[in-house]
Image: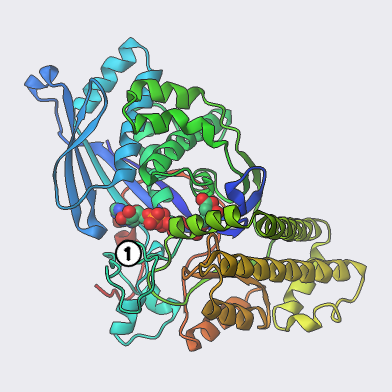
Amino acid sequence: MAVVASAPGKVLLTGGYLILERPNAGIVLSTNARFYAIVKPLFDQLSPESWAWAWSDVKLTSPQLNRESMYKLSLKNLNLQRVSSSDSGNPFVEHALEYAVAAANATFDRSKKEALNKLLLQGLDITILGCNDFYSYRSQIEARGLPLTPESLAALAPFKSITFNAEDDASGQQCKPEVAKTGLGSSAAMTTAVVAALLKYLGLVDLSSSNDKETKDLDLVHIIAQSAHCIAQGKVGSGFDVSSAVYGSQRYVRFSSSVLSSAQDAARGLPLQEVIVDILRGNWDHERTKFSLPPLMTLLLGEPGVGGSSTPSMVGAVRKWQKADPQKSQETWRILSAANSVLETQLKALSQLAQEHWIAYKSVIDSCSTTKNEKWLKQAADPNEEAVAKALLGAREAMLEIRKHMRQMGEAAGVPIEPESQTKLLDVTMNMEGVLLAGVPGAGGFDAVFAVTLGSSSSSNLAATWSSLNVLALLVREDPYGVRLEGGDPRSREITSGVSTMSIQ
Ligand SMILES: Nc1ncnc2c1ncn2[C@@H]1O[C@H](COP(=O)(O)OP(=O)(O)OP(=O)(O)O)[C@@H](O)[C@H]1O
Ligand SMILES: C[C@@](O)(CCOP(=O)(O)O)CC(=O)O
């Protein structure tokens, strides 16, 4: 029987770079863009000779990249060996598989281990699929002469094939990733979906109910996915992307990287069976608290160019600057950290006001949705409305402060964190009626920008303005849910629900 799990992509609203160091926090919103993993047996029945086999056959298919790889998984030392492939493999899925099987092996008693071996001898057939929102389709839309609008995106066939970035960029722009992506964290969502589907398939987690057991299950998915993701990436990032893929929107403080030191040793030859025990027993000290946008606010993403930026090279440059100019960099980080906290506090205050004074809250949001920010305070008719308007303006001020110092950090480190073209776009965006905030998410650069709009009409107005500025408004919205089990293959769901009236193949 097939198991299908999915995990969401993310947008880091605050905390880019700072979140790499404890105890700095970041606000991360998960999205309705999801990555799916389908796991099923490769063979219908156990072959009569299979009892003598010391390996499991694994097939990994990535239809959007037109890739298929075959592996052998040693049942003795749990290592995965690629035996044939149309490409260079997928380190994220490969590590996810090794770690998930090792976790089952380390946890199960003898009889469960025998059942596990039998299941593995039936082989594993893994398919991975990412929603279109993870990837850039701008070039195809432009090439077909279609308008740069969300409607053109909605007309694309679901799970469309992915554009690779050209290796030699004619513009000479550095930092381009392998596939043309929007910056939603495809590798973290992919790793998390694969780990969840495998742990469920192997019988280590349940994931179908919401109780204490569910939290324990999610914690297990998290530590396995986080370890596999770091090792596959070859670096220990802050982990906000994996955490939001597992638990959904949240305020996040990173784990201490020492928890992964033994996994890093594994990359240098320590047996996986030993490493996994350390990972399972490790002191995972990350903090996560519930956070989502206040009511009547919409998260929007706009893609200003094609292909996005590669985070690791930007992080490297910022770290170099921190070493070269500790005094200035500490000062910038202090200001950024304070501004991040103010934005968080104002958004929390708005959620609170919505809860306690809904009528005043709704009335202010409605009137602000059609007016520019200079008028927001003047429109407030009583103290409660004034409190709402003040919190909205406080959030804007904090965002402007964050942008200013992120820009300065980029200039000092010599990397385009908020490059000039993005600054112009964000300024126009933040000055529109009904727009609360706009910024570059995460590490910044040329990935899609985000905006938070107020009320119902302002998001379509913003999409239309972006389109006139040659910016493609994506279909992505905030969706606070993390990893989950799915009822079936998402491709059959798309077909049966007859999603789009017209499909661009
Ligand atoms: N549908 C897919 N099938 C197989 N591999 C994929 C798929 N989508 C993305 N990948 C792989 O995932 C990796 C993307 O990782 P990378 O860290 O560059 O981007 P990201 O996780 O989206 O980063 P960001 O947080 O900046 O968005 C690439 O190696 C890419 O080949
Ligand atoms: C720069 C950094 O703080 C954020 C990167 O975010 P993103 O991948 O650009 O969304 C790196 C990290 O947190 O791992």
Quadrant of res 70: top left
x then y, percent, for residue 320: 53, 55
Question: SS for tag 1?
Answer: loop
Q: Would you place residue 290 above or below residue 11 in this image?
A: above
x then y, percent, for residue 119: 24, 25
x then y, percent, for residue 334: 72, 55
Pointer 1 residue Cβ closer than 8 Å to ligand 1: no
For badge 1, the amino acid type reads Pro
Q: Would you place residue 287 above or below residue 464 in this image?
A: above
Quarter of the image with the N terminus is top left
x then y, percent, for residue 17: 58, 55
Residue nearer the viewer, 403 or 192: 403
Q: Which residue is mark 1?
A: 158
Quarter of the image with the C terminus is bottom left
Residue nearer the viewer, 209 or 54: 54
- Within the displayed image, which quadrant is ligand 1 positioned in? bottom left
Left or right: where does residue 134 sit relative to residue 70?
Answer: right
Query: Is residue 362 visible in the rendered structure shown here?
Result: no
